[in-house]
Image (tube, grey):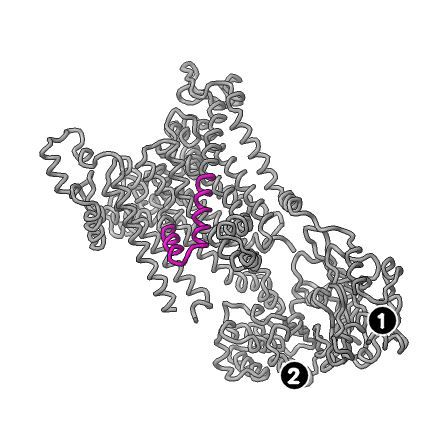
């Protein structure tokens, strides 16, 4: 039984130049206690699909889905009040920019306690004790003093820890981390990632890790979903994905990892993710795919079976020979 | 690899719209702005063609028909559709001619204030620190006086007339242009394209007027629209206080001042000139809002 | 904070000097000879004229005159009115409470209506309410307030007879000014109906003077709210499951207030300009009317002194706004 279940999720943004589809027919399942990674370049719609699940998209967005449920409860049919009881308590999210994600006008302590006040029946003193405890859990030294700080008085890493403290305040069953380390210094990145994984182990919550860093995926995730231009192009367990990627895009992403480089020059994926005005007709990856032919450019590809990693491709990579070719 | 990039170029179903048409599309989307544009166009036409449109000479007095009410009210007649004022002058003709003065005031003030303001602002933006400080302090000083009061005193010094009112208003509005231009110049100057122009050997004047200025124009254009309406309002206020256009000039503010003592007896002599000011100013402000939304990419929906 | 305060205070000095210089220079180029004006209808002998020129120091070098004026200003001596023969300083502070009372009422009127209107419009952006509100605000913003005043007089005083047309209180009532604020004084006087009369006199001028600030505040609040509502921390607040009223009313408004406070402060200058028209129309015995009357009477010392005091007043308000800005913006406060 999956905790979060999305079927055929699409998100469209109204812009002056017409509708822009940021998320396109995405399916997703997360089991309780599982770590799922969603991987993709910027603009691949990985954050947007999760924001849709949280109900945090701006008013310009239109969300459609065949199913969108949390713990068996339909998120779409829910009243705003019922959904707010869920969001922030059972499902929590942290974001990419810790510096701008905290309200500059309030102390971090206020912002942590506010989450407690909203969802838990604690008195003032209990809230304070819990806030101190949370700060200790996320590794903020001198919590009593730090609670009175404003966000701009702390570093990005510390602010991200505060964000994590807010997110886990009510012991959520699902934590969505949207590129939690991208905006941080390299040395801090590993710390935050370790913190997230250890918190996940301690509390047994499910963790969705949105990232564009394959290295992070290899170290932390159990299952991986690869997104490209708003579509899910492949989904596999992490070992399988790194061993036998079925979609050319996944293969190319892996080939671009420095650890995997076989030549002196690191291979790259030419071109960029298509934008609003240059969406191809057929397979969205076709302009950048080295295997693409006329069919790929004309006809949108089908989704392959589970044995082929649900790859959205006309010619999923199967044989070892071809994989070797793609890696070279 | 070369193959891949050429394919990107070939798979472009919808092309990105051009700059002017994009501007127009954004502007057109704002219905209020388009209405404002139409009203403003009508206002300009009236201002230009007042002589032909007006049934009477705006200063001709008809002693036999003073304070005639508008045509739809009892006692009104079609010979004076909007009634007459206490001296028997045709309201409609005076209002039509009034558009001419307001339009004239707006144009002159905007041209004078923006020309001077942009020039000073550009200089301040490019000047060494001490000169910049002096200029901006000076602008602070002017801005410390409430604009209408400053204009009032200036007109009192120069002598009450429409020309002097225009000079005073232009002087008072100028600091806003200076601040705006300087702010955008300083913002633009740090950008790479300016550095590359400088590296390419562009002289200071070329840098100021050809490289930087065009990129600062968007907020200035919006300011121009807004100060057009401010100018009309202030000129009317000065006229109302007796420090602008002098009677019998059919300037809207002056007409209101003349009509003040009749407000409880003849509503039309008070209502119509004010309505004319309001509609004109409103149309220009609507247009200004539309301009701002269309020119300011920050506020665009994305 | 202290450094910020001192830096801000330091810019006050040159501006003050400049304002003094301008208000001094203005009057020196004003056409008409002040001494002739002072003499009035009766005329003046040549000897008496020369005597007065020496007495007022008009024969001395201009910079010396400025120095005298400037040192006088610093000691609170702004000269005496040519018409009433009373010190300008005293006249200003006798009339100032009337303007202050009206301005405070107007700005409260504008804030009490404008802030909620702007917040609601931002939250329901694009909906009917937003459009209706913003159209109304634009009309208010475009309003020639001298005409607006006349219209209100026609309707409320002429047709309905609800409100008086001029002054601060009915002539029936008389009591000595204690604070200079008619609302307080009338209540203190204990006379029946005095307070009600003062309120009734205040209504129309308040609406007229408050209209443009109201429109500006509503528009500014809306746009500041819209900007803030797209910030990351609003998303965080919503991710906590907070109610919309808490997200909008606390998290967003607290941040949106920072630019709005600035705008409210800056509208004080507009308010004083508006007071000139409002007070003239409603015969409100305040600074605005005093200035207009003095300009027409060519009462130079009053125009000069009034100009200076009003500018200084605006500068003090701007300074206060800057400091307030520092207080409500923690990024500056704790630096």
Residue B118 location, x and y as percent?
A: 46, 46
Check the image and report above or below for A260 versus B240.
Answer: below
Report in which chain the residue with disc 1 lies.
A
Where, by quadrant of the figure, is residue B245 drawn? top left
Check the image and report above or below for A108 versus B72.
Answer: below
Q: Is residue A32 left or right of residue B181?
A: right
Where, by quadrant of the figure, is residue C31 drawn? top left
Residue plotted at (30% across, 44% down) = C286
Report in which chain the residue with disc 2 lies.
A
Q: Nearer the viewer, residue A260 or B102?
A: A260
Disc nearer the start of the sequence (1/2): 2
Residue plotted at (13% across, 35% down) = C49
Q: Nearer the viewer, residue B23 or B214?
A: B214
* Quadrant location of the N terminus of chain B in the rendered image: bottom right
Residue C210 location, x and y as percent?
A: 43, 46
Give the residue pinned by disc 1.
Answer: A310
Q: Nearer the viewer, residue A215 or C274?
A: A215
**Dot 2 crowding, Cα within 10 Å, few <14, some 14–19, many 20+:** some
Check the image and report above or below for B23 versus A62.
Answer: above
**Secondary structure under the numbered disc 1 in the rendered image:** loop
Q: Is residue A15 left or right of residue A114?
A: right
Check the image and report above or below for B248 versus A123.
Answer: above
Where, by quadrant of the figure, is residue C288 drawn? top left
**Secondary structure under the numbered disc 2 in the rendered image:** helix
> What span is colored magenta in the figure?
B110-139
Residue plotted at (42% across, 47% down) = B175
């Amino acid at each position: 039984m999956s905790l979060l279940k999305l079927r055929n999720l699409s998100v469209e943004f109204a812009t002056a130049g017409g509708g822009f589809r940021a998320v396109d027919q995405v399916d997703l399942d997360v089991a309780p206690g599982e770590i799922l990674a969603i991987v993709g370049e910027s603009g691949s719609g990985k954050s947007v699909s999760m924001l849709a699940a949280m109900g945090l998209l701006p008013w310009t967005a239109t969300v459609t889905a065949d199913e969108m449920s949390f713990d068996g409860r339909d998120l779409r049919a829910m009243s705003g009040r019922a959904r707010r009881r869920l969001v922030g308590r059972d499902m929590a999210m942290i974001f990419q920019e810790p510096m701008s994600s905290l309200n500059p006008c309030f102390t971090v302590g206020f912002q942590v306690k506010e989450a407690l006040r909203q969802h838990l029946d604690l008195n003032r003193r209990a809230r304070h004790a819990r806030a101190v405890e949370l700060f200790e859990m996320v590794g903020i030294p001198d919590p009593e003093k730090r609670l009175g700080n404003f966000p701009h008085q702390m570093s990005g890493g510390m602010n991200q820890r505060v964000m994590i403290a807010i997110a886990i305040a009510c012991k959520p069953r699902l934590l969505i981390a949207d590129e939690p380390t991208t905006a941080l210094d390299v040395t801090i990145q590993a710390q935050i990632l370790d913190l997230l994984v250890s918190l996940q182990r301690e509390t047994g919550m499910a963790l969705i890790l949105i990232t564009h860093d394959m290295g992070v995926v290899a170290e932390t995730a159990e299952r991986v979903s690869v997104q490209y231009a708003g579509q899910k192009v492949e989904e596999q367990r992490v070992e399988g994905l790194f061993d036998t990627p079925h979609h050319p895009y996944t293969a190319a992403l892996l080939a671009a990892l420095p650890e995997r480089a076989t030549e002196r020059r690191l291979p790259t994926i030419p071109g960029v993710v298509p934008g609003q005005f240059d969406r191809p007709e057929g397979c969205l990856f076709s302009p950048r795919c080295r295997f693409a032919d006329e069919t790929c450019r004309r006809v949108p590809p089908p989704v392959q079976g589970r044995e082929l990693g649900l790859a959205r491709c006309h010619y999923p990579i199967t044989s070892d020979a071809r994989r070797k070719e793609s890696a070279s | 690899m070369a193959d891949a990039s050429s394919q990107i170029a070939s798979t472009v179903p919808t092309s990105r719209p051009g700059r002017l048409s994009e501007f127009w599309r954004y502007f057109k989307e704002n219905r209020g702005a388009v209405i404002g544009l139409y009203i403003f166009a009508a206002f300009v036409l009236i201002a230009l063609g007042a002589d032909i449109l007006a049934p009477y000479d705006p200063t001709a007095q008809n002693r036999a028909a003073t304070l005639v009410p508008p045509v739809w009210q009892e006692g009104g007649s079609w010979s004076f559709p909007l009634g007459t004022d206490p001296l028997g002058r045709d309201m409609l003709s005076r209002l039509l001619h009034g558009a001419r003065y307001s339009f004239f005031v707006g144009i002159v003030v905007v041209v004078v204030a923006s020309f001077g303001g942009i020039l000073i602002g550009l200089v301040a933006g490019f000047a060494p620190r001490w000169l910049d400080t002096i200029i901006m302090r000076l602008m602070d000083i002017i801005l410390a006086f409430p604009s209408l009061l400053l204009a009032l005193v200036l007109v009192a010094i120069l002598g009450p007339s429409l020309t002097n009112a225009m000079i005073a208003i232009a002087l008072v509005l100028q600091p806003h242009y200076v601040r705006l231009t300087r702010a955008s110049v300083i913002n633009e100057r740090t950008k790479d394209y300016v550095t590359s122009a400088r590296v390419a050997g562009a002289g200071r004047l070329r840098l100021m007027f050809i490289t930087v200025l065009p990129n600062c124009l968007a907020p200035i254009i919006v300011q121009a629209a807004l100060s057009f309406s401010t100018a009309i309002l202030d000129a009317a206020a000065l006229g109302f206080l007796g420090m602008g256009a002098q009677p019998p000039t059919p300037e809207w503010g002056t007409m209101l001042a003349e009509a003040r003592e009749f407000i409880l007896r003849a509503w039309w002599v008070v209502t119509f000139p004010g309505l004319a000011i309001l509609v004109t100013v409103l149309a220009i402000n609507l247009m200004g809002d539309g301009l701002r939304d269309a020119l300011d990419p920050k506020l665009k929906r994305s | 904070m202290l450094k910020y305060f001192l830096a801000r205070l330091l810019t006050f000095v040159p501006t003050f000097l400049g304002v003094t210089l301008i208000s001094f220079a203005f009057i020196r180029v004003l056409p008409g000879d002040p001494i002739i004006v002072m003499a009035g209808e009766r005329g003046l002998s040549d000897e008496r004229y020369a005597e007065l020129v020496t007495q007022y120091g008009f024969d001395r070098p201009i910079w010396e005159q400025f120095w005298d004026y400037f040192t006088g200003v610093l000691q609170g001596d702004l000269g005496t009115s040519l018409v009433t023969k009373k010190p300008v300083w005293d006249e200003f502070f006798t009339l100032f409470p009337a303007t202050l009372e009206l301005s405070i009422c107007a700005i409260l009127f504008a804030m009490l209506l404008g802030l909620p209107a702007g917040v609601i419009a931002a939250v329901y952006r694009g909906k009917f309410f937003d459009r209706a509100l913003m159209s109304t605000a634009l009309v208010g913003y475009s309003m020639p307030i001298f005409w607006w005043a006349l219209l209100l007089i026609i309707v409320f005083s002429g047709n309905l007879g609800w409100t008086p047309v001029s002054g601060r209180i009915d002539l029936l009532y008389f009591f000595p000014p204690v604070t200079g604020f008619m609302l307080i004084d009338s209540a203190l006087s204990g006379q029946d109906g005095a307070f009600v009369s003062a309120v009734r006199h205040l209504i129309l001028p308040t609406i007229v003077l408050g209209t443009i600030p109201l429109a500006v505040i509503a528009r500014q609040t809306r746009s500041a709210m819209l900007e803030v509502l797209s910030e990351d921390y609003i998303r965080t607040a919503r991710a906590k499951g907070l109610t919309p009223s808490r997200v909008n009313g606390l998290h967003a408004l607290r941040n949106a207030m920072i630019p709005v406070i600035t705008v409210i402060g800056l509208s004080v200058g507009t308010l004083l300009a508006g007071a000139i028209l409002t007070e003239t129309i409603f015969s409100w015995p305040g600074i605005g009317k005093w200035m207009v009357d003095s300009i027409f009477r060519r009462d130079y010392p009053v125009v000069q002194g009034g100009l200076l005091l009003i500018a200084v007043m605006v500068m003090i308000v701007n300074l206060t706004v800057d400091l307030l800005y520092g207080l409500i913006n923690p990024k500056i406060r704790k630096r």
